[in-house]
Image (cartoon, grey):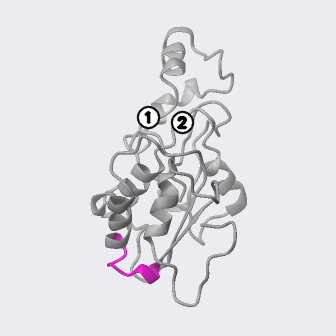
């Protein structure tokens, strides 16, 4: 599952341009003709991405098997579909801690929730962060770590985190602090340069 760190869907300026002119000059491939397909889950932080819009985004709905918001081994064209959901673009925000916390909420994963069925008791949760520094997420690394561990039944061995950010963990890097909150599973060691 790919989750973006933004509380909004698309670009408000493009949405307005679509309504007034039928196109967005700043983002020529913006999906003006597909705005009727945007759902509440597309606009919900923490929901798996299936339709990103904006500069350098996929700008189209990604076809995921079973109507889910995450990929499984049933997914045809896995590499192509992953490329679609992972192409979030450059116009969002870096609310990665807030997005992770929201994605772990029980109601988000319950039947009828945006990510229904994503969290499974028998599955390892691997979280990989890619982005800039998270200055603005609601909450703090302790709260986000608690939410993740709670979602996995309190078992730190059921969670692995990787941050592809500055390996020196500078002071403003709250995601690095979050990654440090999750213990390394027994038998695994930290690799130089990875957090």
The tag on residue 66 is none
| Mark 1 neighbour density, 10 Å: few (under 14) some (14–19) many (20 or more) | some
In the displayed orientation, state which residue is furthest to the left: 107
Q: What residue is rendered at 46% in x and 30% in y? A: 36
Residue 159 location (% of width, % of height): 47, 75
Residue contact at pointers 2 and 1, CB within 8 angstroms: yes
Q: Is mark 2 on a helix, strand or loop?
A: loop
Q: Is residue 88 left or right of residue 114?
A: right
Residue 177 left/right relative to 90: left
Residue situated furthest bottom in the rendering = 187
Q: Does 157 appear in magenta?
A: yes
Q: Mark 2 points at which residue?
A: 92
Q: Is residue 163 above or below residue 63?
A: below
Quadrant where the C terminus sits is: bottom right
- For residue 166, what is the image quadrant? bottom right
- Residue 69 vertical position relative to residue 184 in the rendered view, above or below: above
Whether residue 114 is visible here, answered yes or no, is: no
Please report the bounds of the magenta region as a residue range. 151-158
Q: Is mark 1 on a helix, strand or loop?
A: loop
Task: Please tell me in which quadrant of the rendered image residue 108 appears.
Answer: bottom left
Locate residue 20, reporting x and y percent. Answer: 50, 9
- Among numbered discs 2 and 1, the one appearing first in the sequence: 1
Q: How crowded is mark 2: few (under 14 residues within 10 Å), some or many (20 or more)?
A: many
Q: Is residue 98 left or right of residue 173?
A: left
Please name the residue that numbered disc 1 is placed on: 8
Q: How far apart are marks 2 and 1 (CA)?
A: 8 Å
Image spot of residue 41 (x, y percent)? 39, 45
Which residue does the image show at 63% across and 54% down from the upper left? Answer: 165
């Amino acid at each position: 599952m790919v989750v973006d760190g933004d509380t909004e869907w698309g670009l408000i300026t493009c949405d307005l341009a679509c309504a007034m002119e039928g196109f967005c000059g700043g983002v020529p491939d913006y999906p003006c003709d597909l705005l009727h397909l945007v759902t509440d889950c597309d606009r919900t932080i923490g929901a798996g991405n299936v339709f990103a819009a904006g500069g350098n985004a996929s700008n189209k709905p990604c076809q995921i098997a079973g109507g889910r918001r995450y990929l499984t081994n049933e997914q045809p064209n896995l590499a192509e579909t992953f490329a679609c959901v992972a192409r979030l673009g450059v116009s969002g925000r870096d609310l990665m801690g807030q997005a992770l916390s929201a994605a772990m909420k029980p109601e988000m994963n319950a039947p009828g929730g945006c990510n229904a069925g994503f969290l499974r008791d028998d599955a390892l949760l691997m979280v990989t962060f890619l982005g800039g520094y998270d200055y603005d997420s609601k909450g703090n690394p302790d709260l986000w770590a608690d939410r993740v561990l709670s979602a996995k039944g309190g078992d730190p061995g059921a969670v692995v985190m990787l941050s592809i950010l500055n390996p020196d963990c500078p002071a403003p890097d709250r995601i690095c602090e979050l990654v440090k909150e999750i213990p390394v599973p027994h038998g695994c060691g930290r690799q130089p340069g990875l957090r």
